[in-house]
Image (cartoon, grey):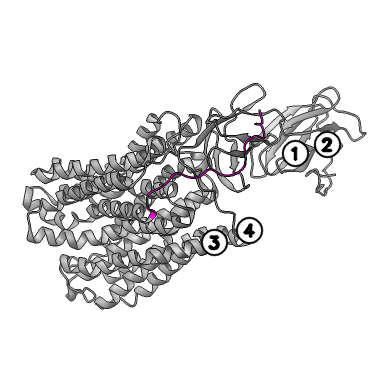
Amino acid sequence: MTISSDTTTDAAPVAPARRSGGVVVAVLALCGTVVSLQQTMVLPLVPDLPDLIGTTAGNASWMVTATLVAGAVATPVISRMADMYGKRRMILVTLGIVALGALVGGFATSLPFLILARALQGIGMALVPVGIATMRDELEPDQVPLAVALMSATLAIGAGVGLPLGGYLAQVVDWHTVLWLPGVLALVMVGLVIATVSESSVRTPGAFDVRGATLLSLALVLVLLSVSKGSDWGWTDARTLGCLAAGAALLAVFVPLELRIPNPLVDIRTAAQPVVMSANTISLLMGFAMFVNMLVSTQLLQTPTDTGYGLGLDALHAGLWMAPSAVAFGLLAPVSGWVTRRFGPEPAIAAGGLIMAVSYLARIPFSDTIALVVVGTITVTIGTALAYSALPTLIMRSVPVTETAAANGLNTLLRSVGTSSASAVTAAVLAATITASGFPTYGGLATTFVLAAVASAVSVGLIIPFARQRFAEGETQPTERLTADHVVRGRVVDAQGDGIAGAVVTVMGGRGSHVDWSHTDSAGDFSVATAGPMRHLFVATAPGWSPASAYVDLTDNRTIAPFVMSERATVIGRVTDHDQRPVPDASVVITRRSGGSVSWVRTDTEGQYSLPLPKEGVYDLTAVDRTSGATTSRILMSGGRSVSADLQLDQPGSLPSPVDADPVSGVPD
């Protein structure tokens, strides 16, 4: 790879003037609140729809299901499009779709049009991860944790305020107001976004993955239909099981497709990183635990007092008593942001999950008054606020800058799956404990609290290893400030010019601090954000290859010369018999300790062999002379560098004696 001249200085360029960070945060947070608001505003209206438009209660429930499914499908698609075509642009598109849904719903008098309106409005949920990604691009690094905490809080703030607001509007004005009011607010947000939010120039190049988007969308629709309608259809009904099986089959096709194509909708290699996978699993579990808080608390408040545990409130007053938890979520955003900035996202998530688990267990004996229910709801909210505000920060620290929106979109999607699962599981548990009065027992409600506590505790267990690692390694250097419009592309190839998939390219700025990183796709291509038109250090690594690096002048470059990996990391050696004579045509194989062959080769006439070095880990290295039946096996420790390992066959029919590993070569003496 060509190394640039020394004429360019290492000083970072002056970033262009930006609008006030506080204004950007406020506008994006308001956008998040608006799209979250309309998620729950319609809930008080659903029980009255059978009389209002002449339909059944089961059909009316599609008003909720359509919003859920549309939001889940739109989130990964719009998030990926935001990374590729511009985050501000997709925020405006999303707000426009919400307004269109409000227009349809405002004049709808039949169920199909109402379902269409709610589906269009559900697409608005994709705005939240795109807004979080925009904050990473537009704000100074020290502003991001607080901004992300506030943006995450909008999910709960909007949902908490929407419930009593929708109940009030449904009682005092025409019921269509519940549908068109979010559209009016969305149009106001369009104007504010145009006036205050700059378009991010951090873009992921390439073509949009239409096949992946289609497969994932169909899979999500089928899986979420089975989860959300299972209680109505029956969990063993052919429709429920058929949707679940078909959705799982499409996901099984989707994953290998994403590994093979350039510019995938979901970068499976990034998503498979342990920290990202844990963060996404935590998002699903905490989505479950968070929604149990809302569902069961509302149930406690609205159940008649003659059940022995209910508090006998109507829907409007129950919604009003739930509002303090939404307010608490908003007030805790600065605290959550400070905790994340001061201690890191891992301790914040662990603390939040622990608070949630303890709170749920404490609520089982202490939920017999309105005050205790409200206090319990707020306590769970404190833990939820800590965890949810830190999850996007953890995601953004663990993925390339050019994949921020897509990664947060996947995380938000799994949160939605968690809330859907909470609704389905809660309905199933409560239905199993229905008494002659038509209401579930308190034991059924307590069971859902236990399930939520378990989900929270598992989340703590998942994040603890990463929290320990963070404290062990200490604070890392901050990411350099990105300037506008500076994403570079490159390729990692072998000596023949063929792309190497799955390589990792890390870019460091003029002061040596980490700026960004990226995986290469199936064609060996990558794109990384940089700290501006200055010199950067690039380091490329790939399993089985020696690393390559270059110090590149990016003053006039948006595409850099390919990294050529010409030196293959190998396991080489010589196979001899018990008399130290070379053994030609012997088979040498590397196997995983968990089972399965990695690679194999035959020795030449001098007993020499060469195998590609497997990725880091511990393996078994075995040689066999098929003529005499003599074998030998040794431990192979792969650490990313070539290994020399001579193998001496044992006498045929004898058992190998124990050997000690050589700490230098990684194989036994």
The residue wearing badge 4 is 473
Of the two numbered discs 1 and 4 in the rendering, the one whose residue sits closer to the viewer: 4
Magenta segment's dominant SS is loop
Whether residues under marks 2 and 1 lie with C-beta atoms below 8 angstroms apart, the answer is yes
Of the two numbered discs 2 and 3 in the rendering, the one whose residue sits closer to the viewer: 3
Element at badge 3?
helix
What's the distance in space between the residues labelled 4 and 3, CA to CA? 14 Å
Q: Which of marks 1 and 4 is nearer the N terminus?
A: 4
What's the distance in space between the residues labelled 2 and 1, CA to CA? 9 Å
Judge from the rendering whether residue 474 lies leftward or rightward of residue 624; answer left or right.
left
Question: Which image quadrant for residue 16?
Answer: top left
The residue wearing badge 3 is 464
**Which residue is drawn at the image coordinates 16% and 47% (left, top)?**
59
Element at badge 4?
helix
**Figure quadrant of the C terminus:** top right
Q: Residue furthest right?
A: 579
Would you place residue 548 above or below residue 655 in this image? above
Q: Which of marks 2 and 1 is nearer the N terminus?
A: 1
